[in-house]
Image (cartoon, rainbow, N blue to C red):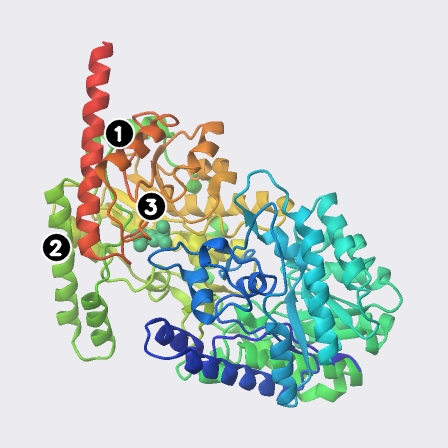
Amino acid sequence: MALATNLGYPRIGVQRGLKKALEAFWAGKTSSNDLLETARAIRKANWLLQKEAGIAHIPSNDFSFYDHVLDTACVVGAIPKRFGQVSGSVDLQTYSTMARGSQSVTAMEMTKWFDTNYHYIVPELAVNQDFWLASRKPVEEYLEAKALGVETRPVILGPVSFLLLAKSQDADFNRLTLLDRLLPVYEELLAELVKAGAEWVQMDEPCLVLDLDAAALSAYKKAYAMLGGISPKLKILLTTYFGNLDKNMDAVLKLPVAGLHLDLVRAPEQLAKAVSKAPAKMVLSLGVIDGRNIWRADLAGALALVEPAVKKLGQDRVLIGPSCSFLHSPIDLEAETKLDREMKSWLAFAKQKLGEIAAVARAASKGRRAVAAALEDCRKAMRAKKTSPRIVNPAVRKRLAKATKTMAKRKSPYAKRIKLQNKHLGLPHFPTTTIGSLPQTPEVRANRASYKAGRIDRAAYENFIKEETKRAVLWQEEIGVDVLVHGEFERNDMVEYFGEQLKGFAFTENGWVQSYGSRCVKPPIIYGDVSRPDPMTVRWSRYAQSLSSRPVKGMLTGPVTILQWSFVRNDQPRSTTCRQVALAIRDEVVDLEAAGIKVIQIDEPALREGLPLRKKDRKSYLKWGVEAFRFSSCGVKDETQIHTHMCYCEFGDIPEAIAALDADVISMEASRSKMELLDSFRKFRYPNGIGPGVYDIHSPRVPSKEEMESLLMKALDVFNKEQLWVNPDCGLKTRRWEEVRPSVAAMVAAAKSLRKKINSHAGAAV
Ligand code: GLN
Ligand code: ZN
């Protein structure tokens, strides 16, 4: 039999039960026992559901209270000293503090998990790091499932990926040198799992899909030579996902593991090589059902991949599974009551995807006939989707086909534009601005909720927003900000707000996916050709501009970010979908200009995040991504100033692409890292206007004028005084007015003080 397998199931629970339980616990409203109880119920429901669905290899230890990388750090005893001397397993309070920080200790760092929108906690390691088996969570959860009558395959983040994903305060030290210290802990853990009765363990080594050097590959060799030999009773399934093993394939096939999992959604082309070169007894786990998207699988397409492999290897050497853990997929399509039947017939969430895995496994074992009805149903739905008028919009396609290169170019080069803009806008040196959003107070949220629930009518809601906007504009004027924002009070979310007004987007009620800890996101679904039936922001922008003689920025989300933070259709290249969004944004930009808006900001915080994992794929992504931004921004006159914004990513490695956006001004997050960003701009001379953030908007702290001024002085080492803008790291919507008012005032004072200094300096030099 080709067995059905799963790599991980969403742990947030239906209706986000874990989120609610965690937040109640953090707020001191419930006890740790209550939280443990909720967690146990979620695990139980998940295991039984998978058993019911016919999954033979069911994962355990895929549950986490916050993050599985943090869990792994806790298992191997890598608990940074500032969280106290911990003996035994970390209690829930300490665990929460590691993840979230407290008044007295800073949290561990958080960063994006490969190219997903899930964030993991970055383990902190020291040169002389000690490891020890500090928690037996994987064993406990294995036994917990067993007691429920469910045999599971414990999931463990592998030792090499664990080290590669960690960071160290100690400069210039190679984390892989810690492998010798770490492996005995893994050995001990695996031995305990064997003792508990586990037949298989799943060792996740997603770093195997990255460009690896010889040192990393030899670390893999050493690690699995050791772990593979622990017990003849234990089978290791080495799991890779999010890409192609590529050049690492040969080395991986030589590792002494019982099985290897491949992501065949992202990289189907790697299967043939794996099948032909896999050693005699190795089991291949074929990830054919997409764990990262919401589309119903093409069962026949999956089988076309699977069948030749089964033929060559034999059924017993094949597992059928998802491309990666369902951590990245919403839970249950059945919970959607507002999507129509047609739309639903195109979709599958985690629960439905389990059924798809089981169907493919069944067909792989018993032949396609065994699942004839499912195949037929799938074929019908796919054919209907292909020709549905909701998917294809001929006008959009025609326009895209006609789009020319000149549409992705401003009329004049920056040097000429900036002169016209300076005349048009009359700004001082070091102009001040903010990134867009202002505090979304409980009152703002309550009003929106009331409006959505029908408790207040549209006029009442809009009046409220108008008042908020007016107050915000007048306040900015009063404290002397140069380029104002309207505050984004009318927006819930920077992608959803646009998606709701664009054609080709659908929204779920419960399609939540964990982003980090208790935070979940509900990405829109881009299912069809994208168009903009009506202006989206012009009315609010025009109103805000009418309140002031200073420029008020038009505020839009860029095409790459809209793409990156949505579930994107898989029936055409992402680049095509991105271009469609770009043209819709372009129309909005042009309409804003016509409405008298002189400065328009198009946010692209997710540009860096979409960067492919492999270096060889990056150039083409950046090319279409940059071009999409330019399509959206280049329809305006030279006088109109285009801004963009980026944050919370390591953009240090793509300065050329950032310059190629050719925005007149870019604002970037920089203060948290104390202007580390400047280093990359020392090497690469950025030509246009730039505002490296001078205050950290994630902290309630009010920064002083002096510290912001000194950050600006630092920036003047790298940028010239004509280039430099003054702004915070990011939008202020999560902050309170009590913090924002003094912070922005101090920021304006810092800019004024700097103007004085520089100008008197210039005077003295003459
Ligand atoms: N304009 C947006 C805001 O200020 C940008 C948010 C972001 O960069 N994530 O909220
Ligand atoms: Zn930002």
Q: Is residue 565 above or below residue 602?
A: below
Camera-side mark, 2 or 1: 2
Q: Which mark is residue 34?
A: none
Q: 401 or 177, which lies in front?
A: 177
Q: Is residue 397 left or right of residue 298?
A: left
Q: 191 or 629, which lies in front?
A: 191
Q: Which of disc 3 and disc 1 is earlier in sequence?
A: 1
Q: Secondary structure at mark 1?
A: helix
* Residue type beneath disc 1: Leu
Q: Name which residue lies at 33% across and 53% down.
A: 698
Q: Is residue 191 left or right of residue 72?
A: right
Q: Name which residue lies at 82% across and 74% down.
A: 317
- Residue, disc 2: 470
Disc 3 residue: CB within 8 Å of ligand 2: yes
- Residue, disc 3: 729
**Quarter of the figure that contains the N terminus:** bottom right
